[in-house]
Structure formats: structure tokens, C-alpha cells
Image: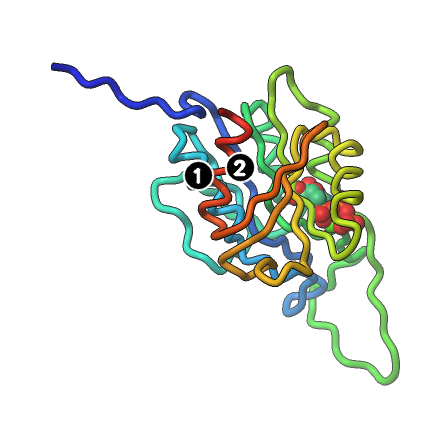
Amino acid sequence: EIIGSIKGPLEGKKVIVTAGPTREHIDPVRFISNPSSGKMGVAMAKAAQSLGADVTLIHGPISVSKPEGIHSINITTTADLFEAVKEYRDADVIIMAAAVSDFTPTEIHQQKVKKAEGENSIGLKRTQDILAWLGEHKKEGQVLIGFAMETENLIENATSKLKKKNADWIIANSLNDKDAGFEADTNTVHLLGIDSDQEFQGPKKDIAIEILNTIFR
Ligand code: CTP
Ligand code: CA
């Protein structure tokens, strides 16, 4: 007797997940970054794979181990991440869990900057908003999932990101929730759609599965 394989809701789908922080170098020994651990992004990648997807994980310097059996691409800067994401712009689903730097130095010093007397300053310019770019170039049927990290007005700010970036879903995190945050194993999130708001709470790996099951059921 031949037993058919159990098909998950993402069977046959190409899913791109970005995870972790980016780094913007000031000089060879210093950079601008953030405390993202990559845990939520890696959990999303594993969850998508377990639901049958063909997953590519594009990640910055993460502090969790890379999931085995998932094709992964290592990047450093926001510009690197943008180039890597563009290669996969035709994916069925793109999940932007990366904590992307909003600014990059106007100048990268080739040598270590020596401490000078008195004050100093770093010139900054905006980086590409990758999710907004994906929203502008969204292909028919493609599902775009973003995250939002907020410290106040969670739903209002995250909903405005959903609309402004033309995303289909935003997973909204508040840094103020006691079990949430960059390095925690647990999270409290709101999954915001065009007309919906559902809350999920618990271990990041469980939340990831529940969110994908909710979106793709
Ligand atoms: N994002 C992105 N490119 C950027 C900045 C953010 O693709 N240059 C994505 C993130 O990966 C996330 C979403 O946009 O999926 C929201 O990121 P967030 O930092 O919460 O929002 P911003 O739009 O950057 O606004 P702000 O930081 O000012 O709140
Ligand atoms: Ca930001």
C-alpha cells in the first residue's frame, strides 16, 4: 500500500524569511546595529518549512543557531539584505522579520577613527525600506508579511505600517510586554490584517506556527 505524503498548507510554495539585525559599519571596528537575536525570524522559517514550504532564510549576524536543512544566506548590511531579497522578489511569500537599520553612515572610514578631543558626530542617511519596496513591486497573489516593533501606540503605529508599506499582514510586537522583546524565547504579538487583529502569546516557535496556520489555513 502506498501512503500519500501529508500536505501542509505551504506545500509547493517558495517562502523567503529575513531574520536578525543588520550592521552598518562606521569604521573597521565600529558599527550601528540593534539587539535582534533572530529568534522570531528563525522560528518563522522553521514553521514555514514544517508546513511544507521551500524556505530560504536571509539573515544578519544572529545569536541563535541556523536551522538545519534550510537554505540560508548570510548578510551584513541593509544594502546586502536588499540585494539578496531582490533576487527572490518572485517568491510566493516574503516574511520580513529582520530588524533592519533605518540609517547608515554617510561615510565609512577605511581606517579606525581615533578619539579626538571634545565632541564628534556621525553623519547618517536613510537606508532603503525593503518592505516598502516589496509592497510597491508586489506580484499578483504574493503574500507580504512584515513585523513592527513599537514602544507606544502599538496597534495604531503597526496599522499605519501595514497600509504605508502595502503589506498583507503585520506582526506587531510591543517592547513593553513583559514576556516579549529582542532576546526573549517568548513573545506577545498582534497579527494585523487589513480588517483583523488577533493576539498570540507564548513561545516564539509556537506563535510562528499559529500565525502561519491562521494566514494560510
Ligand atoms: N523594514 C525594512 N527596511 C527598512 C526598515 C524596516 O524592510 N529599512 C521592515 C522590517 O523588516 C519590518 C517592517 O519594515 O518588517 C517594520 O519595521 P519597523 O522598524 O518596525 O518600522 P519602520 O518602518 O522602520 O518605522 P520606525 O522604525 O520608524 O518605527
Ligand atoms: Ca525601523
Residue at 85% x, 74% y is: 120
- Secondary element at image label 2: helix
Residue placed most toward the observer, 154 or 125:
154
Residue at 30% x, 23% y is: 6
- Foreground mark, 1 or 2? 2
- Looking at the picture, which amino acid does disc 1 mark? Ala
Between the residue at mark 1 and the residue at mark 2, the CA separation in whole angstroms equals 9 Å
Q: Which mark is residue 34?
A: none
Q: Which residue is mark 2?
A: 211
User: Which image quarter has ligand 1?
Assistant: top right
- Secondary element at image label 1: helix
In contact (CB < 8 Å): disc 1 and disc 2: yes
Looking at the picture, does residue 73 appear above or below residue 22?
above
Q: Which residue is mark 1?
A: 47
Question: Which comes before the other along the chain, label 1 or label 2?
Answer: 1
Residue placed most toward the observer, 105 or 185:
185
Residue at 53% x, 38% y is: 17
* Residue 89 x %, y %: 60, 27
Residue at 63% x, 53% y is: 22
Number of residue marks: 2
* Residue 35 x %, y %: 61, 62
Looking at the picture, does residue 84 appear above or below residue 25?
above
In the rendered image, the residue lying farthest to the right is: 118
